[in-house]
Image: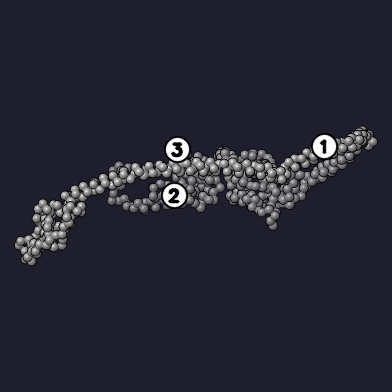
Amino acid sequence: MDSESPPPAGNAPEWSVSDLSGALKRTLEDAFGFVRVRGEISGYRGPVGSGHVYFSLKDANAKIDAVIWKGVFGRLKTKPQEGLEVIATGKITTFAGKSSYQIIIDSLEPAGIGALMALLEERRKKLAAEGLFDAGRKQLIPFLPRVVGVVTSPTGAVIRDILHRLEERFPRHVLVWPVRVQGESSAAEVANAIAGFNALPEGGRIPRPDVIIVARGGGSLEDLMGFNEEVVVRAAAASLIPLVSAVGHETDVTLIDHAADLRSPTPTGAAEKVVPVRAELLAQVTDLSRRLSGATLRLSERRRNDLRALARALPTPETLLAAPRQRLDLAAAKLGPALARNARAYEQRLAQLDRRLHAESPAAKLKTHAAKLEGLAKLLAAARSKIFLIERNRIARARDNLHSVHARVLPAFSRQIQRRRDRLDSVWTLAASLGPQAVLARGYALVRDGDGNLLRSAAAARPGLALQVTLADGSFGAVVPGGGASPPQAPRQASRKPAGGGGQGDLF
């Protein structure tokens, strides 16, 4: 029998699908319980609704599915990004629902410095595109802050260097917000410290800093990664208090340096930038005070000399008053004749006004109006006489016209009444000839039932129905043959009016 032929069916053990999947899972997990895999992230779409993350790790020849649980994803220092080459640490297991194997990732780190630098460059471009690094957003550092806030580790040499430098240059009140400057939680602590300083109220129990220094000593790129996180950069850009970045040595550049209002190459340099040297300020103030005193003295002496020169150029009081005094004498000589002329002019005006007043007096006006009224009265009397004659003539003509019209209207009215009477007689005659009584006189009759309703057809006359028959000269009762009604009543004489009387006969 061929060595490669399958064993007989009767000797092969039977597996259920679940048992076989479980056996494969245990075998795979026992052989690859903990692995580190290097590859490129592919198919990353972010957390799903449950908070878990699904993607693939691939290289040039193969691909493996990867899963990061929700709790682990929140603790990751390096977040997955599409196309990023990483080193993933976790365990290999299977997923029975798809008959596939996958890696459950516990930690994630960039694959080497090159990948980490590429990640930082991509993050820098993204934040720069949002405008977080624009020069227009940066604030000026205060010349002499009252309170200096420092975000750094309280146990390192950095805080001692800063305090020592501040004490040497210009002692200020310093608030230290202790944070971790390395590790997974450092970024969140630094961001919270910056936001915390900004949240302090003005005039509160804890003084609000006028400037913030974020400081850390030198280290590798991995050690400084906390200051390259987005949360730290966004907190620095959003700070309303001017912020100085002093992370690492002079050659170290982090993303917070771009978002800060001022970058210092070292923490000691940051202390030098935020406060001036007190001795230099005192010397400068003393020099400025000395220069101000000398300038004031020189200005006073120059103004005094100018005043003396101007005083020598001024004329004497007698010279200033000579011309006005002469004008006064001339005006006094002209005043007497001018007053006399003015008085005569007013006298003449007063005489003219007196004459006008007499002409416009009430007595003169009453006399003038009386004469006007007398003339108007005469005109009115003449007009009344003329109007009376005109009206009397008009009334006489109207009376004559009325008599003439009356003489013509009475005969015309009598003729009109006679024509209307003749026409009415002819209408009554026509109405009498067309009325019901005339129709009955020609041999017709009206037949009613017992209720007084007219019978219009023979079908309505039922046997035994009592009838009332009306002729031209009277009416009588009748019964339709075939019934048991009472015998007909005797005819009664109908009342009529004479036809020639102009009235209409009664049909009933």
Crowding at mark 1 (Cα within 10 Å: few <14, some 14-19, many 20+): few
Disc 2 vs disc 1: which is toward the camera?
1
Q: Tag 3: residue type?
A: Asn
- Give coordinates of residue 183: x percent, y percent: 60, 49
Crowding at mark 2 (Cα within 10 Å: few <14, some 14-19, many 20+): many
- Residue 157 visible? The answer is no
Q: Is residue 481 left or right of residue 425?
A: left
Quarter where residue 64 is shown: top left
Residue occupying image coordinates x 39% and y 47%:
98
- Give coordinates of residue 245: x percent, y percent: 66, 44
Q: Tag 1: residue type?
A: Ala
Mark 1 or mark 3: whose residue is earlier in sequence: 3
Mark 2 or mark 1: whose residue is earlier in sequence: 2
Residue occupying image coordinates x 84% and y 43%:
289
Residue occupying image coordinates x 21% and y 47%:
426
- Give coordinates of residue 116: x percent, y percent: 57, 41
- Identify residue for label 1: 345
- Identify residue for label 2: 93
Disc 1 element: helix
- Identify residue for label 3: 61
Disc 1 vs disc 3: which is toward the camera?
1
Q: Nearer the viewer, residue 76 or 231?
A: 231
Q: How far is the residue under mark 2 from the one under mark 3? A: 21 Å
Q: Tag 2: residue type?
A: Thr
